[in-house]
Amino acid sequence: MSIIRQHSETEISELKGHHCDQLIGVGSTVSNGLSLFFIFVSGVMYKFFIDEGVLTWEESLQNPEDDLYDGESYIDLVSHFGIPRSGELRKIEMSDSTLKIHFPNMGLQFTNKDEMTFVTKVQYIDNLK
């Protein structure tokens, strides 16, 4: 399923009810912020990032390792935040420079930490509504 977005406000309703097989971030550590993200849903890999409050979301056909710079690595956000493997996606929404990915009883919030450095802060949100 090809999904492309480049908006400051959007919802990715096409993935509602699908299962997140993997969610990884690119960077040095979660606490320092991450720059690029890959989410695997129903066998399709999507790449996304936030730049100046705009979400760019697209299907990724390239090898994610092509996006690593020196000192960066992949961080498994599913393991890091304790998201159940194959967690159902309830909602994916972008507004007010923040992307929220909703899972049952929890979610992740992605916000530009510093728009000048293209770094995104990721937070676990309990009972995300």
Image (cartoon, rainbow, N blue to C red):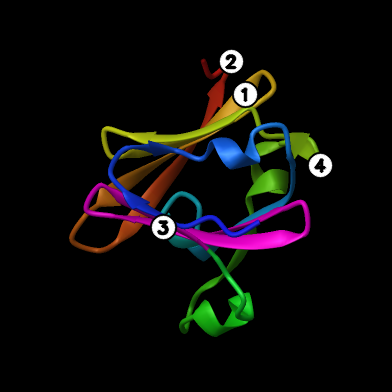
* Residue marked by disc 3: 49
The residue beneath circle 2 is 127
* Residue drawn at point x = 55 percent, y = 35 percent: 13
Q: Is disc 1 in contact with disc 2, using a CB cutoff of under 8 Å?
A: yes
The kind of residue on which mark 4 rests is Arg
Q: Quarter holding the N terminus?
A: bottom right
Q: Distance of mark 3 from mark 4, alpha carbons?
A: 22 Å
Q: Which residue, given by chain and number where applicable, does mark 1 sit on?
A: 106
First along the sequence among labels 1 and 2: 1
Quick one: SS at disc 1? strand
SS at circle 2: loop
Dot 4: few (<14), some (14–19), or many (≥20) neighbours within 10 Å?
few
Q: Residue at x 73, y 39 (%)?
A: 18
How far, Cα to Cα, is label 1 from label 2? 5 Å
Q: CA distance from mark 1 to mark 4?
A: 13 Å
Graded by Cα atoms within 10 Å as few (under 14), some (14 to 19) or many (20 or more), the crowding at tag 2 reads few
Tell me: 83 left or right of 116.
Answer: right
Instruction: Tell me, yes or no, whether the two marked residues, 2 and 4, touch with CB atoms within 8 Å.
Output: no
The disc labelled 3 sits on which kind of residue? Phe
Q: Which mark is residue 91?
A: none
Q: Which mark is residue 85?
A: 4
Q: Is residue 2 visible?
A: yes
* Residue type of the residue flagged with mark 1: Met
**Residues drawn in magenta:** 37-58
From the viewer's side, name the closer residue of 69 and 11.
11
